[in-house]
Amino acid sequence: MKVVLAYSGGLDTSVAIKWLQEKYDAEVVTVTLDVGQMEDLKAIEEKAKVLGARRHYSINAVEEFVDRFVARAIKANALYQGKYPLHSALSRPLIAEKLVEVALKEGADAVAHGCTGKGNDQVRIEVTVKALAPHLKIIAPVREWELTRDREMEYARKRGIPIPVKDKPYSIDQNLWGRSIECGPLDDPYAEPPEDAFEWTVNPLKAPDEPAYVTLTFENGLPTMLNGVEMKLKDLIMELNKLAGRHGVGRIDHIEDRVVGIKSREVYEAPAAVCIIEAHKDLEKMTLTKHELEFKSVVDDKWSRLVYEGLWCDPLREGLDAFIDKTQERVEGEVRLKLYKGNVMVVGRRSPRSLYELDLATYEEWSKFDQKLAKGFIELWGLQTYLAKSRGGRAEPDVGGKAQRSKR
Ligand code: ARG
């Protein structure tokens, strides 16, 4: 049997190489994706080879991740349950796609991943694999073997698998859109996250006393310039992660509902994501009609839930994207952000497509808004409300004393 394993270089997937060889007598091919997690892919490849991987694929998927996944998340203002920018969730369908690609090329019988049976990642990877290549068997060693951490270490020691010297008690998953931090002291939802949980953001207390101003320029709903300098989206995100991180912006502490029903405490760092989504939402308010905004917030929320729940491949996601893309044709302009001690504030916005009309909004004499028209408007706007009220409401007091029951 030939198995293609999604390999991160960590202990779980390292143990999985040996386990697949022993339990299934499998020939193991390993795959590692670069999605901007800033790890040494060469070292990961060497480790896989030492552990007996027959072949290893290092795939640079950064641009594809940004263009196909992160860009759509920006247009959809994607924040699961209003908080989580979905960075981990967005990378899983891409990892699954690449696993399938390699499996087909290698003529493999199965794919394998190191996700546990408690999380969302198993759902995201397996749903995608099943949708793309239903004939492939899926093996989830970590879920099947139910090893405790201690027994896993013992297994590793016996087989000469290097055990990473862990200085921190956290489980980390990261890519250029954000960093997820779980476990250890974070399991107590009442305890404030210790400072050492954070790596991309400084403690707001230690952030500079001077605020930083950042201008983001958007075209078709995506940022194309940072402070007037044109950049590829991937470079803009990396730059903004550093800039906003220096001001302590992007820390998120969230109680989250997992697909499998568990509530979990999740801590994230996503400086660029938090800034970009804040700016993007603001620019949409300036350029989209109130009807579009109202409907889009429902679509955005549905999009985030679908992606969180592993249904990237569902046709509904593409349908929602088609609607979203249509609205984004008019989302262009500039947003000015102020970064200060852990906060990001929109302090200015302008757009050639702006629906904000000073001539209408101003209280100065030159206003073009004809206030006389408002009188008739109010007559019609409240018509049914006046009628209902006059027929006698039950719960509210009859303030005017005018309620009369209609007696036909
Ligand atoms: N709770 C987040 C999610 O479900 C983060 C998962 C992080 N994954 C991990 N292997 N640490 O998307």
Image: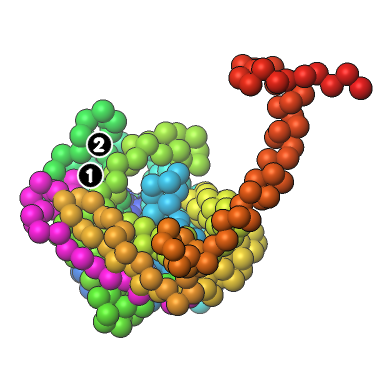
Of residues 194 and 108, which is closer to you in this image?
Answer: 194
Residue drawn 56% across and 68% down?
327
Q: Is mark 2 within 8 Å of ligand 1?
A: no
Is the residue marked by circle 1 packed among few (<14), some (14-19), or many (20+) residues within 10 Å?
some
Residue drawn 61% across and 19% down?
399
- Dot 2 falls on a residue whose secondary structure is helix
The tag on residue 170 is 1
Evaluate whether residue 291 shows in this view.
yes
Q: Earlier in the sequence, mark 1 or mark 2?
A: 1
For residue 364, side relative to residue 395 (left or right): left
The percent coordinates of residue 248 (x first, y second) are 18, 53
Q: Is residue 201 magenta?
A: yes
For residue 243, side relative to residue 362 (left or right): left
Is 120 above or below relative to 385? below
Specify the amino acid type for callout 2.
Leu
The percent coordinates of residue 380 (x first, y second) are 72, 46
Query: Of circles 1 and 2, which is in front?
Result: 2
Residue assigned mark 2: 186
Among all residues in the image, which is located at the extreme right?
408
Q: Quadrant of residue 387?
A: top right
Tell me the distance, in whole angstroms, between the alpha carbons under discs 1 and 2. 8 Å
**Start and end of the magenta stretch?**
197-220
Residue drawn 88% across and 18% down?
407
The tag on residue 11 is none
- Image label count: 2
